[in-house]
Image: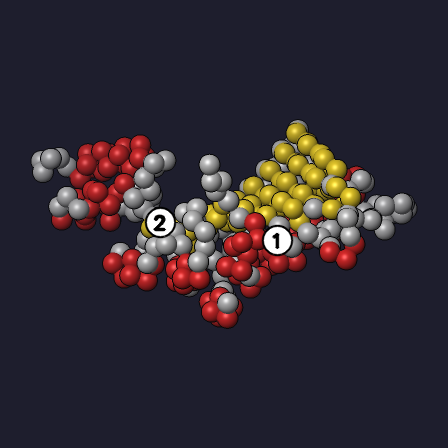
Amino acid sequence: MDLFPEEVLLEIFEFHVKRSEDMDWNAWHLLIHVCRRWRNIVLSSPRRLNLRLLCTERTPVTEMLDIWPAFLPIVMRNGGEEPSDDDAWNVVSALERPDRVCEIVFEEILQV
Amino acid sequence: MKVFSTAMHGPFPVLTILVLQVGYRWHSFFPDPFLDRSAPRLRSLDLDAIPFSAVHKLLLSASCLVDLSLWDLPRYVLPKELAPCLSSMAGLESMYLGFRYAEYLPHQKRQHSYPLPRTVLPALTYLGLKAPRGYSEGLMARFDTPRLHKVTAHRSRSTPDPSII
């Protein structure tokens, strides 16, 4: 894989991310943990790979945003749990970055 | 909730999708100031049981909106109140308005002897309504929808108690 040019790797990464999109929003996380080269390629193509940080009410948002590059957009979704008071802090932490929030989706999730 | 009030200021410059369909359990998480801001790149807005007055500013700024769904609106919205919000939405393709109750419409029987100012929604293809009797006529008197080809309409239920709307 080291011999593949960057464009070829990007094609493969794009295929992987799109194929996983419905099941795993964080499919690109796997790629950046392979090696430094892959990490650089992924993080230098945020639009093409549709890189976004998924936050739920249970995500420790402040810690997560400290780890990832500041240019990545934030998607807020609820995880279907009953909201607690602590959840409010995570929601607020994400919404305090309005310049990065690209989606807010809070839907009623029916418990079967 | 004071924390929210201080956090919820300023525009959402990159927000493209906003869906709040969680009933009243989550409403305290998203109080009015949260929605009282601009979102110029918003393409899809889907809200449940949130008063029109709370999203007025948001709608005025959302000139890129493609899909608009306002479910279970707790209060009646006059078509003339809608017009300024929708006038800049040249790309609006789908709109649903649902009112919780069939409120009395004082203007229903009034006949206008002059032409009403009309707003053009050039891209609208779908209109869904759950509204009081006569609302759709009032709405269509205010809007030109040259590409509209699908309309669904249901009557809102009667108001059980005027004091709660």
Viewer can see residue A41: no
Q: Is residue B129 left or right of residue B161?
A: left
Residue at image point 62% right, 46% down:
B70
Q: Position of residue A24 (x, y in %)?
A: 32, 39
Neighbour tally class for label 2: few under 14, some 14-19, many 20 plus, Cα within 10 Å: some
Q: Residue furthest left?
A: A3
Viewer can see residue B67: yes
Residue at image point 13% right, 46% down:
A35
Which one is nearer the viewer's eye here, A80 or B95?
A80
Point out the image quarter for the N terminus of chain A: top left
Which one is nearer the viewer's eye here, A65 or B121?
A65
Q: Position of residue A48 (x, y in %)?
A: 31, 41
Residue A54 vertical placement versus A86 (above, below): above
Which one is nearer the viewer's eye here, A13 or A20?
A20
Q: Residue furthest front?
A: A112
Any mark on residue B50, and which?
1
Q: Is residue B116 left or right of residue B23?
A: right
Mark 1 secondary-structure assignment: loop
Q: Position of residue B69 (x, y in %)?
A: 60, 43
Identify the amino acid type marked 2. Leu
Q: Residue furthest top?
A: B149
Residue at image point 82% right, 49% down:
B104
Identify the amino acid type marked 1. Ile
Residue B13 vertical placement versus A21 (above, below): below
Neighbour tally class for label 1: few under 14, some 14-19, many 20 plus, Cα within 10 Å: many
